[in-house]
Image (cartoon, rainbow, N blue to C red):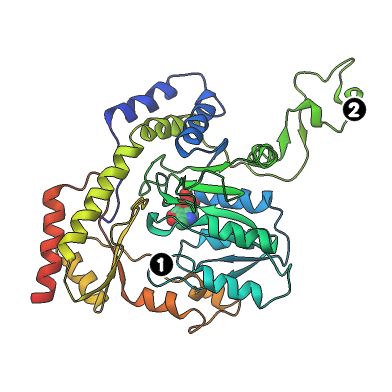
Amino acid sequence: MIPYGKQNITSEDIQSVIDVLKSEYLTQGPKIKEFEDAFAKYIGAKYAVAVSNGTAALHLSTMAMNVKSGDKVITTPITFAASANCVKYCGGEVVFSDIDPDTYLLDIKSVKRLLEDSPKGTYKGIIPVNFAGRAVNLEEFHKLAEKYDLWIIEDACHAPGGYFIDSNGIKQNCGNGNFANLSIFSFHPVKHIACGEGGMITTNDKNLYKSLLKLRTHGITKDESTYTNSIGFAGGKDSYPAWYMEMQELGYNYRLTDFQAALGTSQLKRADEGVALRRKIAEKYNSAFEGLTFIKGQSGVEDGHAYHLYIIEVEDRLGLYNYLREQKIFAQIHYIPCHLMPYYRNLGWKEGDLPNAENYYKHCISLPMYPTLTDEEQDYIIKTIRNFITQ
Ligand SMILES: Cc1ncc(COP(=O)(O)O)c(C=O)c1O
């Protein structure tokens, strides 16, 4: 059986987890900060906050950006539901905007139209997604965000190691915090870095960083300089006693464990190697499918694409999907448009609202893409797809 995505666990990874299991701390120990520092360095951001999963990262991010009841936030319909749901967790309203049919990313032109058609202040933020691993040009979104006073939360779950080239010719890594207020990542096993479950938020904003640290752990702080209760109340004489802490706002337990963090740090050492292998696989698919007229579109080979997914569009998607399954190749569909999920339909979204996303969904199929996919396996996938047309 060949799945569409798979983790890559080495003996070093396993040893790193065992070492933590034998150590003093299973959670809230030194491995968290180690992972955060290594990740921030890899991405090129100032701060990183490790959390229990990508959804928690999104939820804390919308909390940190102060999303409140009725606040309108724009995102893409072609993403995992969590990119939109995080707005709902805070009582906000999700406004889906259509994708660019060539890149499959949130189309800046349709976002512009939304913004121009409403009074300034209608929208609070944008959540662009580096879907499939292709980097959004955040410089352009940032300009728009400045004009309309919007914040940006970049959903970079698919794109650690991805980048775009800015207008000065400079490489801008996904999640580096130069254009987004916050960026979030997931360490689910099909992602580039696997922790089992896990997530990270990166930012260059110190205040947001501090706020996220607190929200991650129930809104509790041990930073004396921010205490509001008196020393006397706390039970001290001249200073706060060592046990004292304050819960200053409503937070959650969204912590990562130390053994997950150790696995993440160990995996991170092979992150670039993983992206290079994914790129090689993409190049091979790309040249194998060149000139095949039954394929309408494909991810292609893009600089800065981190290739979480390799997507093609075909006329008979159901036929190809079933044929591949019969041959033990488990392709996947990314994604059923969020706005047409029953939950969002019940909020008023309907077919025809976002034609590019809906048309894309009719044809898209994600082929197996992961660093340990062998040459033989990929040859077999390519041959099977070719057989499908000629059968
Ligand atoms: C684009 C995107 N955003 C958010 C998430 C949520 O991450 P997690 O599964 O770690 O909660 C995912 C994971 O599938 C994702 O693909």
* Position of the N terminus by quadrant: bottom left
Residue furthest out toward the top: 238
* Residue at 22% from the left image edge and 51% from the top image edge: 281
The x and y percentages for residue 186 are 46, 47
Would the CB of label 2 be found within 8 Å of ligand 1? no
Q: Secondary structure at mark 2?
A: loop
Q: Is residue 286 visible?
A: yes
Tally the marks.
Answer: 2
The image quadrant that residue 225 belongs to is: top right
The x and y percentages for residue 99 are 46, 71
Residue furthest out toward the bottom: 352
Residue position for label 2: 230
Residue 68 versus residue 186 in the image, above or below? below
Q: Which mark is residue 104?
A: 1
The x and y percentages for residue 271 are 35, 38
Residue type at mark 2 is Ser
Residue 156 versus residue 314 in the image, above or below? above
Marks 2 and 1, how far apart at CA: 54 Å
> Who is closer to the viewer here, 264 or 218?
264
> Who is closer to the viewer here, 170 or 259?
170
Residue 331 versus residue 54 in the image, above or below? below
* Marked residue nearer the N-terminal end (2 or 1): 1
Q: Is residue 2 visible?
A: no
Residue 151 shown left or right of residue 239 in the figure? left
